[in-house]
Image (cartoon, grey):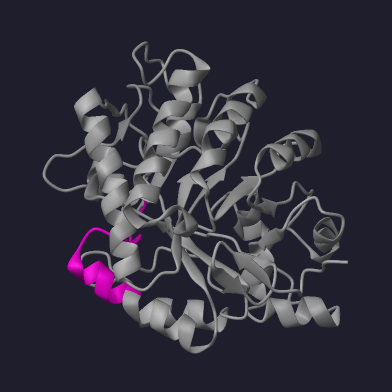
Amino acid sequence: MTTAFDPIDLSGTQLANRIAMAPMTRSRAFGPGHSPTDSVVEYYAQRASAGLIITEGTQPSVVGQGYPDTPGLHSAEQIAGWRKVTDAVHAKGGKIFAQIMHAGRIGHPDLLPDGLVPVSASAVAAQGQVYLHDGPKDFVAPHELTSDEIRATIADFASAARNAIEAGFDGVELHGANGYLIHQFLAPGSNLRTDEWGGSVEGRIRFAVEVTRAVADEIGASRTAIRISPGNEYNSIVEPEPDEAYIALVKQLEPIGLAYLHLIERTRDLTNVLRKQFSGTLVLNVATEGFTSADELKLIEDGTADIISFGALFLANPDLPARLKAGGPYNTPDVASFFGGDDKGYIDYPFLES
């Protein structure tokens, strides 16, 4: 019987166990040009016993930033900062993928230079506010990307992926979940387009598919992954009947040969359908009432998933794999600090410390 503590071959990347650290926004990029600092190095090195670390969302371009002090992968300073992180994780025997996250309409012009504004599939503002250094501000209506701008944005993702490999990452995870740009194209409430990038299911999934293909072409499919969250309403997403679109999406992603598919679970029925459709490694962020716990490891044993990702519990317990194997004890996550719980796809922002 396969257990969470057995190694796994992730398309050529050897993982020591099947316990992943979920991506969680930290807002600690205080270095030059939003680059990681020594605190970021320490934070990830502390958690290197994870089979796989997936970093916080990292913007592929200046306009992709959605929160204060989040890191990028589009400059020499950022590459150098991340190289310190990857070196530290690898020195402790860990593996680490960079999550590339374009926030799309989630953000504010005050975060962006030179008169830039957030962008999205359509000029539909998200409901709610973003926290800035001078306080919360309402989301604004984004600029609707033109076809040429969509192509340029896809190229930004590919360039960021190349930079991630230069920075020493073992691969990249594309953030297609939780209401950010890729998800904004997938969801009918934020994608009102009638051209080839919207309208039908085929049109709405096209951006996600083409971003994934472009990144796989740039760095290799074995180092490329994507995270999805069918039906997740976070960040004002309206996606009332998502199953058809995500089944179609995974059908198109399957032949690319990705390192893994990271699924934020909606229903076990959909999980089982996508599991059968995707022949590669399935990383599952399990649907639970609270934060993901040791109880979910049985889903590896019964074949529901190959890897389980943990968020809140990894923040509170940097040596989580050892504690899981020993049956505890566990430091209790401060769940009240979360907007609904990080490992359900919500970020630990603002400034939740380990």
Vertical placement of residue 301 versus 200, above or below: below
- The x, y position of residue 13, in whole percent, is 54, 69
- Location of residue 220 (image quadrant): bottom left
Left or right? Give the position of 63 relative to 328.
left
The quadrant of the picture occupied by the C terminus is bottom right
Q: Position of residue 156 (x, y in %)?
A: 26, 46
> Which residue is at a point 21% across and 65% down the rendered structure image?
33
Q: Nearer the viewer, residue 333 or 201?
A: 201
Q: Of residues 51 and 230, which is closer to you in this image?
A: 51
Q: Hey, which quadrant is residue 9 in on the image?
A: bottom right
Query: Residue 202 placed where, x, y %?
Result: 48, 20
Is 283 left or right of 215, judged from the image as shown?
right
Relative to 67, say whether 354 is above or below.
Answer: below
Q: Position of residue 175 (x, y in %)?
A: 47, 47
Q: Quadrant of the N terminus?
A: bottom right
Asked whether residue 46 is drawn in magenta, I would say no
Task: Inspect this view and state whether residue 350 appears.
Answer: no
Tell me where the magenta segment starts and ends, as one range: 67-82
